[in-house]
Amino acid sequence: MNATSVESEQQIKVIIDNLKHKPGALLPILHSVQETFEYIPPIAIDLIAKALQQTSAEIHGVISFYRHFHTQKNSTHRVEICRAEACQARGARELEAWAKESLGVDYHQSTSDRNITLDPVYCLGNCSCGPNIRIADDVIARVDPKKFDAIVKGLTTAKVHIQ
Amino acid sequence: MTTTLYLPKDTTTLSLEGERVASSILQLAQQQNKSIELIRNGSRGMFHLEPLLEVATDKGRIAFGPVTPQDVESLFEADFSNAQFGTNSVCEHPLYLGLTEDIPYLKNQQRLSFARAGVIDPTDIDDYIRHRGFVGLNMALSQSAQQIVDEIKDSGLRGRGGAAFPTGIKWQTVLNCPSTQKYIVCNADEGDSGTFADRLLMEADPYSLIEGMTIAALAVGANQGYIYLRSEYPQAKLILEQAIKTAYTKHFLGDNICGTENHFHLEVRLGAGAYICGEETSLLESLEGKRGLVRAKPPLPAIEGLFGQPTVVNNVLSLAAVPHIIADGADVYANYGQGRSKGTLPFQIAGNVNNGGLVELAFGITLRQLLDQYAAGTASGRQMHSIQVGGPLGAYLTPDQWDTALDYEAFAQIGAVLGHGGIVVFDDTVDLSEQARFSMEFCVEESCGKCTPCRIGSVRGTEVIDKIRRKEDLAANFELLDDLCETMTDMSLCAMGGMTPFPVKSAMQAYRATLDEQDIAQQEALEC
């Protein structure tokens, strides 16, 4: 979606108007904006600041504090690998090494075709079934390098997220 | 006749192709003209058996698991949906587990808070009511606020989030505040690695949390509540929001609860991937729409909490224990457990084990007994080597410490914490110096940055551990690490920096012992 158009500005204003009456409205607004656009467009920051009578710097400060919020448009797929201890105990260190090597990227980087971004995540609450990864909202359990390759292949060819 | 089937819709089941299992079942049933009703329940917490498919029969539910999409056809061939207990063709199916309630993993537990988990349809309020739902709330509605608080005090319930502060005393503090605006905040920011009890409860039995929060509101005179849920739990959000909507429709939430003069409004608020927001003051900042910076205490949140008003901040499990305590009496709850650790704790067995899952038991069983009885060894087939109990801020325990009773005081005595009940097992391939480094690295990643010992100490910590791992100037660097840990413990504003030394020191102590062994071995080799 093109977030610079007049239409998206209008959408952002509707989101803000629907939520700004709530006590502590900022996080609900940011969640709603990101849900709509998959990231938080720069124009949203100014609009939110104005509506909540805060400075754009304050809004930016909140966005940058939380790992969940992004101010840049994603690659097609965000692949997150759980780095926490319970997954480590089941082979997550080997998995992350393999993922970095096979995709040719480090954490917080995207593949050159902008198809996949690799990110770390710290615990998905599925700690008996690790190593876990997440693609969009889908948690996938017991991922070894072989399964990882199959999943990535699915993302590359089909460009839909798989269960 | 329509057969009722159950297949969970919790995150674990979904992560193991649960949706494909469900759709295969529906598709084959239609093709074969079988009349079935597929209820999507919560998980029973036996994750090694998920997806766990159950068939309702006269004698109780019969279970099959773990079911993969490829297994569904063979289940239909065995005519599983007409299963009766003891019928041969079904019993011979390799996934047949017998009556669910008789599976030892489940049968030997003492489930109070999780009694309904996996039994009921999570969002069906009538199902909840049929299973003693809202009994506690109805009793609380006829009691005075002080009576409710006294009951919670008498039960000995302590904060299940990890800090183990007596819940009743917290509630009393809020009740005593004269303010007209008070809040109940549920801490559902379950970020500790190795823990999933909050998620399981919210996905399996959301009304028990809603009921617990409503009782808390009656006890302290609050009319607004928030569930601060981590954004990593979208499935829990979906289920909670459905349940809250139904509770409003049926007048268990909103104005004039159950036709009384009491009002309580409840909303789910999402976190945004910051571990520190599980710390209660950081959580409150986040709820107010700010960066999750930790506040200095005092003032206590119970006196000046959300938006400066008196606020109860309780973990999911503390609040979910409340309906049972009110319904069955404080003494029934207090009869479980030992010493000052009363009631039950849902232990979460995770990491390198065969049978991981949720085990609710009274406090007092030892760590070794718990793992012997439930874990069924490591998934890798190797020796268990060390166990991290209590999340990323909990100590690594070596075999000589595994006979410690799982009880808040017993753990404190050995310099460890029980925390939220997460137990992460590592096998003998673990490099504890690497784990210690990770604990520091995690603190670097998740520190809110407000206080120096945590923000800078963690960075210096990774550097010192790196030097030790490179065997540089060992004695001096071990001493430096000890100093650093002492500073972090004593000077940090909250548990993030204050408790990171627990895993670091315990892991490095065990690592150092292996170094000493190597040194001795080298010396012996030289002498020969």
Image (cartoon, coloured by chain):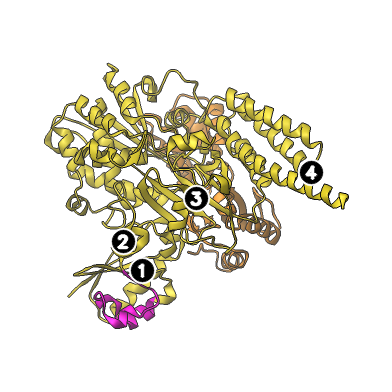
Chain colours: A orange, B yellow
- Residue range in magenta is B72-98
Q: Residue furthest top?
A: B178
Label 3 packing within 10 angstroms: few (<14), some (14-19), many (20+):
many
User: Can you identify the residue that label 2 sits on?
Assistant: B40
Q: Amino acid at mark 2?
A: Arg
First along the sequence among labels 2 and 1:
1
Which of the numbered marks, if any, corresponds to residue A124?
Answer: 3
User: Earlier along the polypeptide chain: callout 4 or callout 1?
Assistant: 1
Which quarter of the picture shows residue B43? bottom left
Residue picked out by circle 4: B470
Q: Amino acid at mark 3?
A: Leu
Report which residue position mark 1 lands on.
Answer: B22
Chain assignment, label 3: A
Rounded to the nearest whole Å, what is the CA distance between mark 4 and mark 1? 52 Å
CB under 8 Å between callouts 2 and 1?
yes
Task: Output the chain of dot 2.
Answer: B
Do the residues at discs 4 and 1 belong to one chain?
A: yes
The disc labelled 1 sits on which kind of residue?
Ala
- Image position of B319 (left or right of B468): left
